[in-house]
Image (cartoon, grey):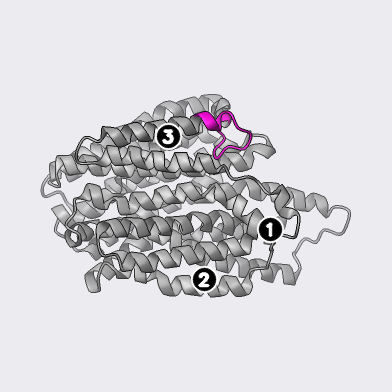
Amino acid sequence: MNPVTLRPATRPATATATATATATTATATAVTPPPQRSSAVGRTVAVVVTGSMLSVLDTTIVNVALRRLTEVFHAPVATVQWATTAYTLALAAVIPAAAWAMARIGAKRTYLLALALFTAGSLLAACAWDVSALIAFRALQGLGGGLLMPVGMTTVMRAADRTGMGRAMALLGLPVLVGPVAGPVLGGWLLDTLSWRWMFLVNLPVGLLALALASRLLTPDAPRAGDTAHAPKLDVPGLLMLSPGLALLLYALAGEHPAWPPAAAGALLVAGWTHRSLTIRQPLLDLRLLRDRTFAASVATLALFTCGYFGSMLLAPLYWQQVRGHGAMAAGLLGAPVGLAVGVSMQIASRRIDAIGPRRLVPPGVALGALGMALTALQTGQAGVPAWRVVAAAMAMGVGAGMVLMPTMTTATRHLPKDRIAAATTALSINSQLWASIGTALISATLGAAGTAPSGFRTAYALAAGVLALALLPAWALVRRRG
C-alpha cells in the first residue's frame, strides 16, 4: 500500500480552490458547477482512478507471490524482495520529475507516458527469465507508477472547481481503500489458478483501457512556445546521486554477505546529494524544510513508522504460506481484513484531524501500531495459534497505521507558507517511499538470517515493532509543537 500518494493533493487542492474562487469573484459565482465542467471533471476522475488502481494494486499484489518467486527463480527471500524494493525506489526517484515533465510536455502527455511505461513494464515483468530481469522490469514499472498519482491529481485539480474538489478527492481515494484489500486476494487467486506471470499480465487490459480513456477524455494541454522557459528545473545531478546511492546502501543492507564497497560508495553518493541539496537554489529535495520543527518531527515520525509498517508487509503472506501451509489465495484473504482496517481508519482519521488535532491521533496511533505489531510477533512465534488471533493483532496494527499516516502528513504542511507546500508534499512522498524500501530490505534480511520457522517470523515482527515504537519519540515532539 502507498498511503502518501494522496497527501500531495490535499493542500494544493485547497490552494487551487482558493485561487479559483478569487479569480471569479468579479463575475458570477455559481453554487453548482456548469454541466459541461462537471462532465469534464467526471471524465478526468474516471481516467485517473483507473490509472491509480493499477499502481496501488501492483504495490500489494506482489507480496503474496514472494514465496512462489523464491521457488521459481531458486533465490532467497532477501534477493526476491528486490522485486518490491526496486519498484518503490523507482517510484520515489521519479516523483520530483513530475512537475518538470508536466511543464515540458503537458500533463496529458506525461500521464500517457506514465501509463505506457507501467504497462510495458508489466508485460516485460511477466516475461522475466530470471530474478535480475524481474527486478529490472519492476523498476521500469515503478518509473511509470511514480508519475501516475501526482500527475493524475494535478490533472483533476485543474479540471475541478471549489465546489467539486472535495467529491473529486474522495473518489481519488478509492484505489487506496480498495487496493490493499483486493490486491492480495487477486494476486493469490491468480497464483493458485494460473501462474505468477498473470500477476503482471492482468495489468495489460487495464493499462490499455486507461491509455485509451486518457487519450480520448483528457483535455490536451501541450505547453505553448515560450512556456518551457519558465518550467521548473530538474536537478539531474542530484537525481543521479540519490537513487543509485540509496540502491547501493540497500544492497549492502540486504545482502547475504558483507558488502562494504557498495555501502561506502552509496554513503558517498548520498552525502554528496545532501551537500548539493543544501547549497543549490532548486534541489531535488529541499532539505532546508527540516528547519521547521513541525515538519522535521513529521518527517521523522513517518520515516520510522513507514519503515516498520511497510517493511513488515511481506511477512504475513510468507507466514500464512510457509508456516501455516495455506495457499496464496487463502493468504490474500487472511490479509484483506488488515487492509480494510487501514483504509477505514485512514478515512476516519483524515476527516477528524482538523476537529481533534494530532495529539489525540498520532501518538495513540503509533502506540497502537507498535502494540499490534508486538502482539503479531507473539502470535506468529507460537505453534497452533488460532488464525483469528493473528488476524486480530494485525488489524490492531492496521488501525494504528490509519491513525498515523494521513494525520501526520496533514500536520506536516498545514503551517508552512503556501509557496513551500509543493516542495514539502514532494519531500513527504519521497520520504515515505524511501523508508518503505529501507524497511522492506531490513525486514527481509532479518527473516533470511532468522529463518522461516515461527521463531524467525517472531524475530522479524519484533524488529518491526521496535521500529514503530521508536516513532513515538518524534510523534510526541510533533504534538508538543502543534498539539
- Identify the disc placed on residue 210: 2
Looking at the rendered image, the disc whose residue lies closer to the viewer, 3 or 2, is 3
Report which residue position mark 3 lands on.
Answer: 269
Identify whether 288 is placed above or below 325.
above
- The quadrant where residue 73 appears: bottom left
The reply to whether the magenta stretch includes residue 285 is yes
Tell me the magenta residue range: 275-288
At 15% across and 47% down in the image, what residue appears? 452
The residue type indicated by label 2 comes to: Ala
Looking at the rendered structure, the secondary structure element under dot 1 is: helix
Query: Distance of mark 3 from mark 2, alpha carbons?
Result: 37 Å
Picture coordinates of residue 14, whole percent (x, y): 67, 48
- Identify the disc placed on residue 302: none
Instruction: Tell me which numbered mark, 1 or 2, is placed earlier along the sequence.
Output: 1
The residue type indicated by label 3 comes to: Leu
At 63% across and 34% down in the image, what residue appears? 281
* 228 to the left or right of 332: right
Looking at the rendered structure, the secondary structure element under dot 2 is: helix
Picture coordinates of residue 297, whole percent (x, y): 49, 29
Count residues near mark 2 (Cα–Cα under 10 Å), then give few for <14, some for 14-19, many for 20+: many
Viewport quadrant of the C terminus: top right
Query: Distance of mark 3 from mark 1, alpha carbons?
Result: 37 Å
- The quadrant where residue 312 appears: top left
Report which residue position mark 1 lands on.
Answer: 158
Pointers 1 and 2 in contact (C-beta within 8 Å):
no
Picture coordinates of residue 416, whole percent (x, y): 64, 34
